[in-house]
Amino acid sequence: MGALSVQQVTKRYGANHILKSVDLEITEGEFVILVGPSGCGKSTLLSMIAGLDSPTSGRILLGGRDITQVAPKDRDIAMVFQSYALYPNMTVAQNISFALEMRKVPRAERQRLIDKVSKMLQLDHLLDRKPGQLSGGQRQRVAMGRALARQPSLFLFDEPLSNLDAKLRVEMRAEIKLLHRRTRITTVYVTHDQVEAMTLGDRIAVMRDGAIQQFGTPDEIYSRPATRFVAEFIGSPAMNLISARREGSALRAGGTDLPLSRQASALVQSHPNAEVFYGLRPECIRFVPAGTGISGELTMTEPTGPETHAFVDTAVGPFVVRVPGRVTARVGEPVNLAWEPGDVHLFDAATEVRMSGASLHCAVV
């Protein structure tokens, strides 16, 4: 059974509070991503689950069994590291079977598992080669194969793709996702790359300063970020966030009234804090004819092929707009922007916690 339960786990190193009462419930067969900036505690949490470090307080359960103080070798967990950690003097087949030999698995069973795993990872034609004769992607697949051959209850991945080039990372992401679909082994995957998080995970735990800011599906994280931090961290380009203030019955920034839905307007009026962050995803903003919307100046464009990221300065604040295809306006020219009031995200300026919802039709991920 691969259900994982992290209960009130904390970790302190002297005065440094690394993990702050982390709770995480992962169902059997689920693929969960731990994502966040460097130093947020995600790799420390993974080490606790693996048994490479011990929590200061709290419990970790795997399949209902308390493994908090269980030795790593007895946890039925397989881990794939950022470095491939392959034995250079061993062939691919020997690397895959090494852990099985240490567990005294019979030779016939070892060979059956080597054949099964190598075919699954398309390594069957490389079994006699040594790591020095392999590409980076092939080495990473061998590391995955070694973990997979153990048939564990839980897979742990610690930024396994960060040493690969951009093209290979995309290919390996697809392979890891297909591998999980075939095996349905419960998986916890650590990354600082929000694109990896969005494309791989069934659910995502966004971490900051040792705490989980939000735990939900990719669509929930993107469409209804729980905090300003999540809104800015998840999504590329990041969500546009404007500092605004309630003035009378309006929400204003730079002397301009900002569009609000009826529900959001009522929420702003009843909210105890007049200071608000007004958020918009770049794909929810569109260019409109002169004399309409909010006027500004196009300051820069970033063509990416199928779309262009347009940077616009306005009296309200700077915006990034995601435009399909090309932008017809030239840098330095005046432009006008508009959006639907229902696409707005609101966050309390003091707590940075979400105030209201937004419609989902713009949440293209």
Image (cartoon, rainbow, N blue to C red):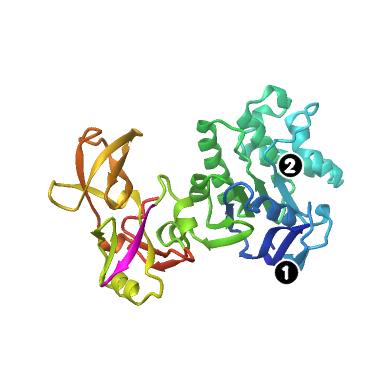
- Label 1 belongs to which residue? 64
Rendered position, 261 above or below 32:
below
Q: Nearer the viewer, mark 1 or mark 2?
A: 1
Question: Around disc 2, counting alpha carbons within 10 Å, would you say few (fewer than 14), some (14 to 19), or many (20 or more)?
Answer: few
Q: Which mark is residue 232?
A: none
Classify mark 1: helix, strand or loop.
loop
Q: Look at the image and give the residue range highlighted in magenta.
A: 240-248
**Position of residue 126 measured from the top left corner of the image (x, y, whole percent):** 67, 27
- Label 2 belongs to which residue? 112
Residue at horizontal 14 percent and vertical 46 percent from the top: 289
Residue 59 visible from this viewpoint: yes
Q: Quadrant of the N terminus?
A: bottom right
Task: State the predominant SS element of the stretch in magenta.
Answer: strand
Q: Is residue 212 magenta?
A: no
Q: Is residue 296 left or right of residue 223?
A: left
**Position of residue 333 measured from the top left corner of the image (x, y, whole percent):** 20, 36
Q: Amino acid at mark 2?
A: Arg
**Position of residue 208 measured from the top left corner of the image (x, y, whole percent):** 58, 56
Residue at horizontal 76 percent and vertical 61 percent from the top: 55
**Position of residue 161 measured from the top left corner of the image (x, y, whole percent):** 60, 38
Rendered position, 23 above or below 310:
below
Q: Amino acid at mark 1?
A: Gly
Classify mark 2: helix, strand or loop.
helix
Q: Nearer the viewer, residue 73 or 218?
A: 218
Residue at horizontal 22 percent and vertical 32 percent from the top: 330
